[in-house]
Image: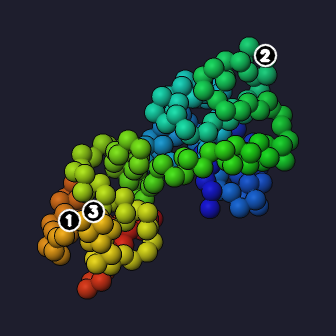
Amino acid sequence: MVELYYVEDDQNIAGIVKEYFREKKINVTIFSRIDAVREALKVKMPAMVLLDWNMPDGRGDELCRWIRKNWKELPVIFITVRGDCRDIVNGFEDGADDYVVKPFSLEVLYLRVQALLRRSNKVREQYLSCSGILIDREKRTVFYNGQNIEVSAVEFELLLYLMENKDRTVTREKILEQIWDVKGNYVNNNTLTVTMKRLRDKLRQPSFLKTVRSVGYRMEDVI
């Protein structure tokens, strides 16, 4: 299911938007503080961020600039009472992809979200997440609970392959074939075992990376 983050301290508005989008098969996670959504973005990438301007612990324009600095492809829509021409111009200059002035039509907001999602598939292709792990394919970086984890090239490929197949058990033979043999580098089972151990050690033995005895491995979100 598509997930959006909505940064909004008015619980009434947030609840109405959340319920409307739920009926459209889109999950909306509400954040009433900027610091909370900052931390959430470090561990899981949504399809889009809906953003109010005035928040109890900061300003939406500052958050928008921070998002654009770190994730230039992540779509952002301002939803705010600030409807002056200068405010709208500033919103786009800060990096917003769209700007909606309150009060607004839920149907129109939904259509704008849908239009933007159609043009932003790259975000869902570039970022993969699982229980606090966030991978950036393009930058080849790994973050776990907001902390950068230094991994080797082969460790990155192993983690990426498992996350691409999240919730599916992948056999050891298939992993060896996809990560090593496809490049003409034949290795034995022990190489995979050693690489997996190193990766698990760096991730502090995560419960979401499971061994399926005598078969292979599986990654799944742990709630």
Its colouring scheme is rainbow
| Residue at the spot 45% in from the left edge and 72% down from the top edge | 167
In the displayed structure, would residue 60 be above or below residue 166?
above
Which residue is labeled 1 in the image?
A: 185
Q: Earlier in the sequence, mark 2 or mark 3?
A: 2
Crowding at mark 3 (Cα within 10 Å: few <14, some 14-19, many 20+): few
The vertical placement of 121 against 38, above or below, is below
Q: Is residue 76 left or right of residue 217?
A: right
User: Measuring 61% from the left and 53% from the top, which residue is drawn there?
Assistant: 3
Q: Residue at x 52, y 40 (%)?
A: 37
**Mark 3 residue element:** helix
Mark nearer the viewer, 2 or 1:
1
Residue 64 percent coordinates (x, y) = 57, 29
- Residue where numbered disc 2 is placed: 85
Question: Which percent across, then down, holds residue 36?
Answer: 50, 40
Q: Give the number of the disc on residue 183.
A: 3
Callout 3–callout 1 Cβ contact below 8 Å:
yes
Q: Amino acid at mark 1?
A: Asn
Height in image: 19 above or below 48? below
Instruction: Select label 2 or label 3 by which is in front.
Output: 3
Q: Is residue 24 visible?
A: yes
Tell me how far mark 3 sits from mark 1, CA to CA: 6 Å
Q: Amino acid at mark 2?
A: Cys
The circle on residue 142 is: none
Q: CA distance from mark 2 to mark 1?
A: 60 Å
| x, y percent for residue 26 | 68, 57
Which quarter of the image is occupied by the C terminus?
A: bottom left
Most extreme residue toward the bottom, as rendered? 214
Alpha carbon separation for disc pair 2 and 3: 55 Å
* Amino acid tagged 3: Lys
Q: Position of residue 207 (x, y in %)?
A: 32, 67
Q: Is residue 169 left or right of residue 74?
A: left
